[in-house]
């Protein structure tokens, strides 16, 4: 699960792209790219040098508080352009981080994993969206959305 740190991020600075379908099964909180094919909008694997989006579907019912929720291929997703959230924070649970979670420390850089669509510890390409670990939380990490400078 990934949560915005402030309500303002959704109400005022979010740029949501409606009517987008998932290109593959993915976790809620997935980091993806976007493909426009005629009138069709579909997510795609994230790639260096492209816009980066996050899938934040509202979980309801019995799954409202599940830390791991899968969005199936072909389902509609709520997609947000992360470039609009530079300088803002996200809370990311351990379930949305791939690799060795125990190795992550404050000031580390996280980026996207193009296979799992999750966050991973790695260096980012200059100009790409990345995430600086600001705080370790009992359920995961708080990250600052930023643009890589190196």
Image: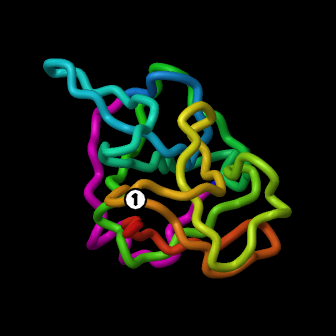
User: For this view, does 18 lie left or right of residue 62?
Assistant: left
Magenta-colored stretch includes residue 68: no
Q: Quadrant of residue 81?
A: bottom left
Q: Which residue is mark 1?
A: 129
Q: Is residue 16 above or below residue 89?
A: above
Given residues 124 and 141, the one toward you in this image is 124
Residue drawn at the location 32% of the way across and 45% of the way down: 49
Lateral position of residue 141 relative to residue 138, left or right: left
Give x and y (percent) for residue 106: 69, 79
Residue at 42% of width from left, 76% of height from top?
A: 88
Q: Nearer the viewer, residue 75 or 44?
A: 44
Q: Magenta stretch: give its range.
A: 2-20
Tell me: residue 90, above or below residue 114. below
Please determine whether, in this image, residue 23 is positioned above or below residue 1.
Answer: above
Residue 132, placed above or below residue 64: below
- Furthest-front residue in view? 150
User: How far across and how far down the image is residue 71, in percent?
Assistant: 57, 32
Q: Secondary structure at mark 1?
A: strand
Where residue 116 sits in the image (x, y, percent)? 63, 35
Say which residue appears at 23% left-offset and 21% top-offset. Answer: 40
């Amino acid at each position: 699960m990934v949560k915005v740190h402030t309500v303002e991020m959704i109400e005022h600075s979010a740029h949501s792209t409606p009517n987008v379908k998932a290109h593959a099964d993915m976790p809620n909180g997935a980091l993806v790219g976007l493909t426009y094919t005629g009138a069709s909008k579909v997510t795609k694997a994230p790639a260096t040098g492209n816009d980066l989006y996050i899938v934040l579907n509202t979980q309801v019912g019995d799954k409202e508080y599940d830390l791991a929720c899968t969005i199936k291929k072909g389902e509609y997703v709520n997609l947000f352009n992360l470039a609009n959230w530079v300088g803002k924070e996200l809370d990311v649970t351990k379930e949305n981080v791939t690799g060795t979670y125990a190795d992550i420390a404050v000031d580390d850089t996280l980026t996207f994993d193009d296979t799992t669509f999750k966050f991973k510890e790695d260096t980012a390409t200059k100009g790409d969206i990345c995430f600086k670990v600001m705080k370790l939380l009992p359920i995961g990490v708080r990250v600052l959305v930023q643009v890589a400078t190196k």
